[in-house]
Amino acid sequence: MRAADPAPTTTGVPAARPAPGEPAPPAPGARPARPDAARWPDVARVPAASRARAAITRAVVRRALGGLPLRAEFAGAEPVGRGGPLLEVRDPAAFHARVGTGGLVGFGESYMAGEWDAPDPVAVLTVLAAHAADLVPVPLQRLRRLWALRHPHEERNTPDGSRANISRHYDLSNDLFALFLDDTLTYSSAVFRGFPAAWDRLAAAQHRKIDRLLDLAGVGAGTRLLEIGTGWGELALRAAARGAQVTSLTLSREQRALALDRVRAAGLGDRVAVELCDYREARGTYDAVVSVEMIEAVGAEFWPVYFRTLDERLVPGGRAAIQAITMPHERMLASRDTFTWIHKYVFPGGLIPSTRAVEEAVRDHTGLRLTRRDAFGGHYAETLRLWREHFTERADDVAALGFDETFRRLWTFYLAYSEAGFRAGYLDVQQYLFTKENPAP
């Protein structure tokens, strides 16, 4: 397996690679090394902020945190908050400058720069996620369009844009993902039998999730299955082992290469085809379609096209099983046009839908019928916890792959931020079954 070459992004942030021999990660609680300005220009540089803006930001931040069940400590100032998990701001001037100019993007970059930290970042971020709707005063929320960053035009999920967006995340390095995922290399929520979840049960929980989807779609011997979003091939392998004929689509060259290796190693090359193909370019008809956490990368303007593709590819009587992360509809509407830290550093072009948005897109643009929907957000929180803990435990191995300390803080924040969203109920995950009715006689 080969690590992907550093790829410059539309925001000027390349995939991070340190020089050989970079020192091991610092001890817990130590201030991280200064970010490399060439790799991380917007993290290395603290934005300029006027005195007035800085004063307003300090007042808004202290007001927002003061009413929350946490304790925020600012170097040289009185702590705020009603008590709870600790948020330690080591460099208040830089922290306020970033938040005042970049909002949540600045908040995440401040963590990457080591200007704030927390003994339990998930606990702090869970509190913030639970109060996301009222952290910013209502008058400032009304001015959101004036200060919120906008999506770069080149990150629209056109066919070319989708290829670039997917590559920036999934082509980072197969070896990186293998360090924190279990042996199934499944990068989506597992389904556990009970909590708390244990690492040695994660692979079985991932198979349980996959089997539930295949059962929903009615996949068995002879089924012609289309998978939209290959991952590293575990679902395709499991479907082929049932006797299905699988066509799996991906836009990641790195994922496709490893998925094909795994298919060949399993002796299932005659039952699984993995194609480097956009879902809009799919052809043929199938008895079933399965797509796991793919819709989040589609973009709202293309949701109708995505669901029409499912409809068009299914034969009459066919079934589509979809796993999707969701968020409350009102929060989706409030944030759908905002460029966030996740867009800039993790998933360019992405948007998490609401259950209402999914169901309206299917109703208005297809002939599919919603037959079943099951939510299991608590399982995703546990999945993310296990990934985050495993990633942290293997920090030296991540560094050995060529990912610098700023990247490791980025990835830790991403996993903690996501876990917090599910723990707070701000995010959920659903398994849907859509069916295509047989035409009337």
Image (tube, rainbow, N blue to C red):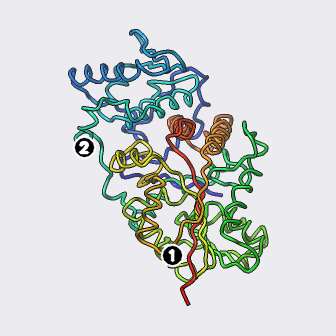
For the N terminus, the quadrant is bottom right
Left or right: 107 with respect to 250? left
- Helix, strand, or loop for circle 1? helix
| Residue 128: x %, y % from top left | 46, 30
Q: Residue at x 68, y 34 (%)?
A: 393
Q: Residue at x 43, y 64 (%)?
A: 361
Nearer to me, 331 or 244: 331
- Helix, strand, or loop for circle 2? helix
| Residue 278: x %, y % from top left | 49, 71
Residue 298 - label: none
Nearer to me, 417 or 311: 311
- Is residue 399 in view from this perspective? yes
Q: CA distance from mark 1 to mark 2?
A: 36 Å
Nearer to me, 254 or 211: 211
What kind of residue is marked 2? Arg
**Residues packed near mark 2 inside 10 Å, few (<14), some (14 to 19) or many (20 plus):** few
Q: Residue at x 74, y 72 (%)?
A: 240
Q: How many marks?
A: 2
What kind of residue is marked 1? Asp
Query: In this rendering, is residue 74 above or below 316?
Result: above
Picture quadrant where residue 408 is located: top right
Circle 2 residue: 145
Picture quadrant where residue 84 is located: top right
Circle 1 residue: 311
